[in-house]
Amino acid sequence: MMRQALLGATLLLVAACGAYQFPGETPSPTPATATVNGRVVAVPCSPVQQAGSDCAGRPVQGLELDFIGGQATSFSVVTDASGGYRINLPAGQYVVKLKTYMRVLKGAQNLTVTAGALITDDFLLDSGIRVPAPQA
């Protein structure tokens, strides 16, 4: 009897350890999921750019992206310091919503996720930074 209880406790411990995930760690995709990743940048970088200097965009840190699927399922991810994000999603159709005042210039906002795929969806946002118009 004691041996069976010990065996049961050991199996429970092994199963629980396999399901643990460290904070900030992204789980690997499974055969039923796909990984969606990308980078979010905003332009212009400043109201006045020097002649001859190009700005490819500044990273947008801390931006929440919501992936809204059928059956009212929703998954969220927040961009890191470099504007990057990575999320595993079940296969399906998603609408991508960015929680920001900035306008989306480029990036797929309707996404089809197929199981086992690695999808890159980068976003370019208009920061709204403009030089004030001269007052007449």
Image (cartoon, rainbow, N blue to C red):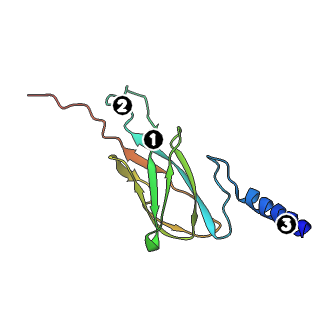
Q: Amino acid at mark 3?
A: Ala
Q: Residue at x 47, y 68 (%)?
A: 73
Please, what secondary structure does the residue beneath circle 3 have? helix
How many neighbours does mark 3 have within 10 angstroms: few (below 14), some (14-19), or many (20 or more)? few
Q: Could you say where residue 90 lies in the image, as x and y percent from the top left?
A: 57, 68
Residue with the most extreme top position? 50
Q: Residue at x 45, y 43 (%)?
A: 41
How many neighbours does mark 1 have within 10 angstroms: few (below 14), some (14-19), or many (20 or more)? many
Looking at marks 2 and 3 on the same chain, the residue that comes earlier in the sequence is marked by: 3
Q: Residue at x 65, y 67 (%)?
A: 116
Q: Could you say where residue 45 lies in the image, as x and y percent from the top left?
A: 39, 34
Q: Is residue 83 visible in the rendered structure shown here?
A: yes
How many neighbours does mark 2 have within 10 angstroms: few (below 14), some (14-19), or many (20 or more)? some
Quadrant including the C terminus: top left
Q: Is residue 119 above or below residue 93?
A: above
The residue indicated by pointer 1 is 60
- Between the C-alphas of marks 1 and 3, the distance is 53 Å
Residue 5 is tagged as 3
Instruction: Please give left or right for residue 39 compared with residue 109 in the image.
Output: right
Q: Amino acid at mark 1?
A: Val
Q: Looking at the image, how many numbered discs can be counted on the residues?
A: 3
Q: Is residue 118 visible in the rendered structure shown here?
A: no
Q: Is residue 97 above or below residue 81?
A: below
Q: Is residue 129 above or below residue 93?
A: above
Instruction: Please give left or right for residue 20 compared with residue 54 in the image.
Output: right
Q: Is residue 86 above or below residue 67?
A: above
Q: Which mark lies nearer to you, 1 or 3?
A: 3
The residue indicated by pointer 2 is 46
Residue 18: quarter of image: bottom right
Q: Amino acid at mark 2?
A: Ser
